[in-house]
Image (tube, coloured by chain):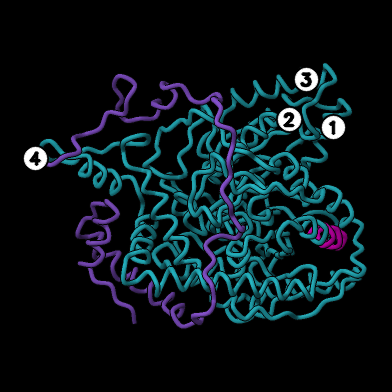
């Protein structure tokens, strides 16, 4: 079997352990795959062949010496361009950071390096993670491997497309309102947003600090669990990272893969999945629910009435936080500097000119919206109210998790839409995040697992599982059970046409 | 219908230090009105007795011992700057002519 790119990360780790391949061979296979297919897909903004192969050689040397650094030592990975990588360009999909090479690693990246995973490169994204289609990247869109005329989701469309098209077995994404899970849904891959604080945010360029969370992007639930073990855990450099030790996700995924969910209580969220959801999405979701019932789960409908206000709350809280975060791009300390056409411009003149030239439309929209929501006279009516709604959403989750162990819904209301379809209609674009946003507002974990193809368009549908904060293991268990039961039906994973 | 005029957008962009062109203003103002309209319902959702949530975690300050730890060198810290001189960020003038 020579095509290593088709294997899961767990299979690659086994092959490395039993000596049937080397990290150099695997890394080269994925770099070759990137060269062959990434032209039209454009999942990567920067490929680091030299660095990845050097890391692979070091990994092979460790293994030859009998001292592998981790279970995934030698398995290559792609990293979303929102995480700082020492010596590797980091642009966040924005012109304003064009050419910036960070002098330090994000903690997630440092942990990947310590665990021995060669970094193939940086993946494309909506500018500063603002978007649901990766069309807002200043460097051009990423295309969906299932249909090149369609979007790969966003903001982490590059990571999802890289994994879906076998350019990388693993990738890192970040999820502020669904940017890991929604791309996972529309590309037929697995995406996990861990509990807020379960993965360090140090070196993750902030969009909205109270919502951002890095997590795994993979093709199987077990691979996501293996990756979570590498990147998770307390970090003294992030004061919001939790000191709680989470239950072992790998054990949970293996338990789930037995397909037995006897005694587990599953709540179908009444407010997520009705009006506005595509028929084929709803159908595959309902079939998934029946599979869980067949596996022994007790399924009930649960109402979370405040969820209908989550989108509005999110699109006030996020711009508010983003508008203050993005103030750091001031043309003084990093990034580009654009000099206005005037004599002796002041620092402020330079900032204004640079921020106009360096930010794209969506970023400007959200900075202005956030500035509005935070300005006196509007603060109470908008930002203050949104924070109260956040409380109501957390209360809905708390009440629901008294009745059930996990909540389920479709991950995204539709399958992948066409490029350009919603580009200049911000509100239509925002609706993609309807089902994913509540988890970010409350800080709870969620996973999206492939649920099959919608009958009307043959495109992937995602099934979302949400669990209480710190109970990420339940997402892995239920996700792995659904994956195992579906793959029994399909006779293996569903993959995009070559 | 929440309305936001081109003049208001100009003022907000000014506060956010973004030099928008007239064409951008004409393009963004109606879009911002539509977005604001779609989130306006928020003002009637929660009653006065609901406390606000700013963060998903109950946060407290985190302290560490006041000891020197390795950090970036001045060269590393300045490596991404558009302009630097004598181990400092070099910036355009920050005061107006009359000051």
Q: Indicate whether B92 appears above or below A152.
A: above
Which one is earlier in the sequence, the residue at label 1 or at label 2?
Answer: 1
Asked if residue A430 lies left or right of residue A353, the reply is right
Q: Which residue is mark 2?
A: A26
Which callout, 1 or 3, points at the residue further toward the start of the chain?
Answer: 1
Q: Are marks 1 and 2 on the same chain?
A: yes
Q: CA distance from mark 3 to mark 4?
A: 63 Å
Task: Give the camera-side residue of A86 and A429.
Answer: A86
Q: Residues within 10 Å of mark 3 (few under 14, many from 20)?
A: some
Query: Label 2 near label 1: C-beta < 8 Å?
Result: yes
Mark 4 secondary-structure assignment: loop
Identify residue for label 3: A62
Give the residue drawn at x 52%, y 30%: A104
C-alpha gap between disc 3 and disc 2: 16 Å
Q: Where does the image place residue B45, in percent across and percent down from the top left?
A: 50, 81
Q: Is residue A333 above or below residue B51?
A: above
How far apart are labels 1 and 3 at the CA level? 15 Å
Residue that carries the numbered disc 1 in the rendered image: A15
Residue at x-position 69% and y-position 60%:
A446
Residue A484 colored magenta?
yes
Question: Is there one chain holding both mark 1 and mark 3?
Answer: yes
- Cα–Cα span, label 2 and label 4: 62 Å
Q: Residue furthest toward the left?
A: B98
Query: What stretch of residues is rendered in magenta?
Result: A479-489
Q: Which mark is residue A81?
A: none
Disc 4: which residue: B97
Q: Circle 3 marks a residue in which chain?
A: A
Q: State the residue in front, A318 or A452.
A: A318
| Protein chain holding label 4 | B
User: Disc 3 or 2, which lies upstream in sequence?
Assistant: 2
């Amino acid at each position: 079997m020579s095509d290593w790119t088709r294997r899961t990360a767990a299979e690659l780790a086994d092959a490395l352990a039993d000596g049937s391949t080397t990290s150099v061979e695997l890394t080269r296979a994925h770099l070759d795959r990137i060269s062959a297919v990434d032209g039209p897909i454009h999942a990567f903004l920067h490929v680091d062949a030299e660095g990845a192969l050097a890391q692979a050689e070091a990994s092979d040397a460790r293994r030859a010496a009998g001292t592998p650094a981790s279970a995934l030592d030698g398995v290559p990975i792609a990293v979303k361009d929102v995480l700082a990588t020492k010596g590797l360009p980091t642009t966040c999909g924005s012109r304003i950071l064009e050419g910036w090479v960070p002098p330090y690693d994000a903690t997630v990246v440092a942990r990947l390096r310590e665990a021995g995973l060669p970094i193939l490169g940086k993946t494309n994204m909506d500018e500063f993670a603002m978007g649901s289609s990766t069309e807002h990247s200043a460097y051009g869109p990423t295309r969906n491997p299932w249909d090149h005329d369609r979007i790969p989701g966003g903001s982490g469309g590059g990571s999802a497309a890289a994994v879906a098209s076998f350019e990388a077995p693993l990738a890192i994404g970040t999820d502020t309102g669904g940017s890991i899970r929604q791309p996972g849904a529309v590309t037929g891959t697995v995406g996990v947003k861990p509990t807020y604080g379960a993965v360090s945010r140090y070196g993750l360029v902030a969009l909205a600090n109270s919502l951002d969370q890095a997590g795994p992007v993979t093709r199987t639930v077990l691979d996501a669990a293996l990756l979570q073990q590498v990147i998770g855990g307390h970090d003294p450099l992030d004061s919001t990272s939790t000191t709680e030790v989470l239950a072992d996700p790998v054990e949970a995924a293996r338990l789930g893969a037995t397909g037995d969910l006897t005694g587990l209580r599953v709540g179908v969220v009444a407010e997520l999945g009705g009006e506005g959801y595509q028929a084929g999405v709803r159908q595959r979701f309902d079939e998934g629910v029946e599979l869980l019932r067949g596996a022994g789960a007790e399924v009930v409908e649960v109402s979370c009435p405040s969820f209908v206000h989550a989108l509005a709350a999110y699109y006030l809280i996020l711009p508010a936080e983003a508008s203050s975060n993005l103030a750091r791009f001031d043309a003084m300390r990093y990034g580009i500097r654009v000099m206005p056409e005037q004599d002796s411009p002041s620092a402020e003149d330079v900032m204004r000119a640079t921020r106009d030239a360096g930010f794209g439309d969506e970023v400007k929209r959200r900075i202005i919206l956030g500035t509005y929501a935070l300005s006196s006279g509007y603060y109470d009516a908008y930002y203050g109210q949104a924070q109260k709604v956040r409380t109501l959403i957390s209360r809905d989750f708390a009440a629901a998790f008294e009745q059930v162990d996990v909540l389920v819904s479709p991950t995204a209301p539709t399958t992948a839409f066409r490029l350009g379809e919603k580009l200049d209609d911000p509100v239509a674009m925002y609706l993609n995040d309807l089902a994913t946003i509540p988890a970010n507002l409350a800080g709870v974990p969620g996973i999206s697992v492939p649920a099959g193809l919608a009958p009307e368009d043959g495109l992937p549908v995602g099934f979302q599982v949400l669990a209480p904060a710190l109970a990420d293991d339940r997402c892995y268990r239920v996700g792995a059970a659904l994956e195992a039961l579906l793959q029994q039906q399909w006779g293996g994973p569903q993959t995009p046409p070559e | 219908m929440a309305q936001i005029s081109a003049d208001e957008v100009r003022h907000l962009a000014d506060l956010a230090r973004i030099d928008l062109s007239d064409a951008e203003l004409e393009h963004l103002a109606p879009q911002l009105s539509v977005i604001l309209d779609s989130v306006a319902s928020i003002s009637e959702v929660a009653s006065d007795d609901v406390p606000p949530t700013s963060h998903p975690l109950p946060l407290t300050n985190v302290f560490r011992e006041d000891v020197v730890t390795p950090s970036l060198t001045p060269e590393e810290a300045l490596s991404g700057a558009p302009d630097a001189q004598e181990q400092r960020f070099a910036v355009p003038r920050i005061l107006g002519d009359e000051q």
